Amino acid sequence: MHFLKVCVVTIQHSFLVSYKLSRLTLALSLFCLPVAVLAHTDAAADKTEKDIERVQVTGVVLNGPGQLVMDPKAPSQPLPAHDGADYLKTIPGFSVTRKGGADGDAVFRGMAGSRLGILVDGENILGGCNFRMDAPTAYIYPELHDSMTVIKGPQSVAHGAGHSAAVILFDRNVAPFEQAGFRTHSSLTNASFGRHDELADLQFGQQNGYVLLSGSNSAADDYRDGEGTAVHSRYQRYSGNIALGWTPDLDTKVELSGARSDGEAAYADRGMDGTRFRRDSLNLRIEKTNITPWLEQAKFHWFDNEVDHLMDDQQLRKPGMMGYANLLRDTKGGRLSTVFTPSMNYKVTLGADQQDSVHSSRLAPASGVYSPLLDDAEISQVGVFAEWRYQLAQFDTVVAGYRLDQWQATDERLKIAGMMSAMPNPTAGQQRDDDLHSGFARYEHQFSSIPASWYIGIGSTARFPDYWELIAKEGIKSKSAFQEIAPEQTTQLDVGYLFKDADTEWSASAFYNEISDYILVDYSNMMKSNGFVRNIDASSYGAEFGVQQKFSPHWQADATLAYTRGDNDTDRTALPQISPLELKLGLSYARNNWSVGSLVRIVGPQSHFDRNKGNIVGKDLGATSGFSVLSLNASWRPVQSLLFTAGVDNLLDRIYAEFVSRAAGNGLGGAIPGYIQTLRVNEPGQTAWLKAQWNWDGQF
């Protein structure tokens, strides 16, 4: 019992006393967790298998045709950064372009930027930085949401236009309050390199309404790679949210919500850091269900979000001569959708959405005296969509959809910055309009004799060039790409198979696509060092496989495999920025209210590349060799409302970098003062972490 007390005290001390948790203390805590639980078998005697909490290490298998749903509150390994991109890394096919300690760009099947549709409670968030410091996921704090849904490929038209690779939905799901009460979720995290996270999600309500209050804070110092080399990567982020809901009956909900977030982050891949990431948003949602026997649902959503981003080389590094750049974006939009059920076998979703985005910028030298704030672009979109779902027979379903989008963009730049001085913009004041069409069809079959299903679908989606392609990059022939590039058209075939019984769950999905007028960013011209865009024809194919196998009530194995290959058919070269073959293997043991587990991540070499070609996120730097990383984890649930998880990521302190990682340095070929320059931004070395989560529901 004395050893038990030492273990418990060690855990409490490591969690409460200091945010700067040492690797030694955390490793001891990890060792003590299962020992402490074994000593308390009497307290856990009433636990059943449903209480076992395993750390998510390999992602999940598909929940439906081309779709998976995850719980962002569930603990996962490796410990994700406090933003949306890192959380996606657990899903087969996803990778993240590392720039520093946070704010990475998500990549799925080699596709990034606006090829991924990322919505937060239906709100479309666009970053302000013309160099992608603040990807949309930089403003997302996953644990404050209840579900995250990924729809692979162009297999839906209901969530925006042009998202050819995937749609990612982060949603809050507020259950009705049957009587006055509250629901709470909170967590604290401590990790190596001075990392600490604090988060609280509070709901108070009764039958006629509710109040939501949530907030988060996260900070970390520079991390070190496997060789002990410091990486310019410290960050601090916070967010706050409030929502007021009115629920006069079970079928009606009106919600007004607001959010604010801000922070700063050091970057290891460029000459400036992000010292302001302020986002303010306002949302109004109205929902009505069970309206008539044939009108199942009607939803209205209006949003307005403003991003105020500041980057400079003055505050988070040795001051330089570049000064300040202040970028702002104001995005307003709305969506109206209705669901009709004319018969038991037939469901129709009809809707319309609209958004308008205005981007502005201003500059200042190191003295901080700013030039006037000027708009540089306005991009607007109006779309209508329809999706049909028809059950042909007991085990056969057909799903199809179509959408039409009208796009309009205006180039409001009078001048374009050059290497030495600003030059007149050849497309100043010009406007371009495009009507784009997208659609899909899918057949689904459920087997009658086994718990399995398969699907096949074909989709085609048109993508209007985004701000970073139209405005932030140059054209082949001029300083402006505004009138040079055509919209991108992707036609893709998706197939998949799903199986689930009591002990085994697995799924496989594969795709092949052909892309007309793929928008390639070329960084090979020294006179256009920020990249120029051109259209090419491209194709890609690949697959993802996932399995979970229970060998006994206690032992479980997990594995995922992901592979994508892409080709530039115009130049007969590789399609850039595609991650290599990746295998994840997980093994866990769970008993009563605790578990221990391991994760082995094996990534193959990548020799299929096109140097200095890429997209708005990054470029190919050359070939990479393969690597493997071993991580360990444990969990303990002493009572139903409290969960402790701990782990050591990259246990063997391997030094490695992802293929899609950005080049390390100051962006001009040199090192950041005080830091050692590497070819790529290396991943963190051995990282120990401890997390506590507390859920408490009650009644007044």
Image (cartoon, grey):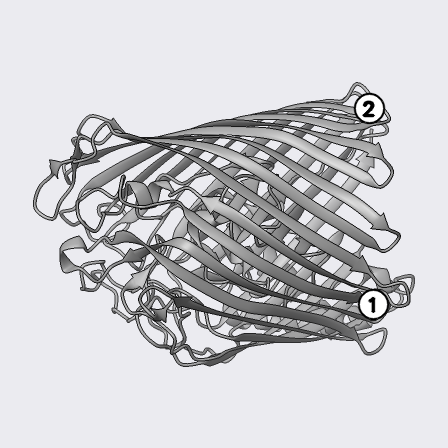
Residues at discs 2 and 1 in contact (Cβ within 8 Å): no
Name the mark on residue 207: 2
The quarter of the displayed image where residue 30 is located: bottom right
Query: Does residue 494 lie above or below 244 as drawn?
Result: below
The percent position of residue 334, horizontal first and vertical second, equals 55, 26
The answer for how far apart the CA atoms under marks 2 and 1 are is 40 Å
On the picture, is 572 further left or further right than 324?
right
- x, y percentage for residue 103? 42, 51
* Numbered disc total: 2
**At x 21% / y 34%, what residue is drawn?**
427
Amino acid under label 2?
A: Gln
Which quadrant, please, contains the N terminus? bottom right
**Quadrant of image for the C terminus:** top right
Q: Does residue 679 lie above or below 520 as drawn?
A: below
Report the amino acid beneath label 1: His
Quick one: 443 or 296, which is closer to the camera? 443
Residue at (55%, 62%) from the top-left corner?
Answer: 79
Judge the density around disc 1: few (<14), some (14-19), many (≥20) Cα neighbours within 10 Å: few
Apparent side of residue 142 relative to residue 414 in the rendered image (left or right): right
Q: Position of residue 327 (x, y in %)?
A: 30, 36
Residue 603 visible from this viewpoint: yes
Left or right: 130, with 259 as reference point: left
Q: Which residue is mark 1?
A: 40
